[in-house]
Amino acid sequence: MCALSQLKYLSGYPPELQEKVRKLIAGERLGAYLAERYPHGHDVQTDRALYEYCANLKREYLRSAEQIDKVTYDSKLDVMRHALGLHTSISRVQGGKLKAKKEIRVASLFKGAAPEFLKMIVVHELAHLKESDHNKAFYRLCEFMQPGYHQIEFDLRLYLTYRDLTKRDT
């Protein structure tokens, strides 16, 4: 596998940072780094538990945001355009009224991930209830809901890189 495809999740980061990651990979230290920083998985394993988890975060940080109708793990998300989570609004006409249902889907691969990674994905999708674009206000909201958001997002990208590398080796 070429070096560029190894770092597909990190393509937007500066070359100096990518070089540090390449050195972690070459020295076979990436897995140890992740295990040390994120030693435990979470216990949010069902769609119902994920809905409750998401609803609790929404209640804590976004009380005035629109209601979430459905939250699920989705096994297709990790292959679709490298989406990790997805928020959708489904509009339907019911009795002459237009009703919109808000849904959040989280890639199933996060069932076994660190709790910080699950929270980062959920926080990201919840932030889209207030800010549709990935702008400064969006990332400020993410940081408010999860301090250290940017570092966790970077580490999540490292996790995905490591996951791809170990899948390739098996």
Image (cartoon, grey):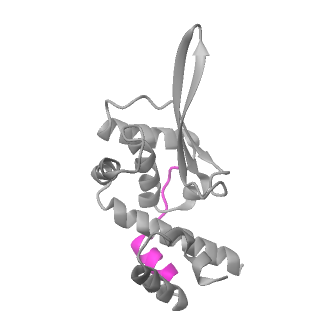
Name the residue furthest top. Answer: 95
4 or 107: which is nearer to us?
4
| Vertical placement of residue 92 versus 28, above or below | above
Magenta residues (range): 30-44
92 or 114: which is nearer to us?
92
Percent of width and height locating residue 76: 67, 51
| Vertical placement of residue 19 versus 142, above or below | below
- In which quadrant of the rendered image does the C terminus lie? bottom right
For the image shown, how many numbered marks are present on the structure?
0
Name the residue furthest right. Answer: 170
Image side of residue 79 versus residue 104, left or right: right
Percent of width and height locating residue 121: 46, 53
Q: Quarter-wise, where is residue 67 in the image?
A: top left
62 or 22: which is nearer to us?
22
| Vertical placement of residue 40 versus 67, above or below | below
- Residue name at image x 60 percent, y 16 percent: 93
Q: Quarter-wise, where is residue 3 in the image?
A: bottom right
- Residue name at image x 69 percent, y 77 percent: 168
| Vertical placement of residue 91 versus 49, above or below | above
- Residue name at image x 53 percent, y 68 percent: 9
- Residue name at image x 42 percent, y 68 percent: 154
Image side of residue 161 versus residue 149, left or right: right
Percent of width and height locating residue 123: 40, 48
- In which quadrant of the rendered image does the N terminus lie? bottom right
Percent of width and height locating residue 41: 49, 62
Give yes or no for residue 137 being in the magenta stretch: no
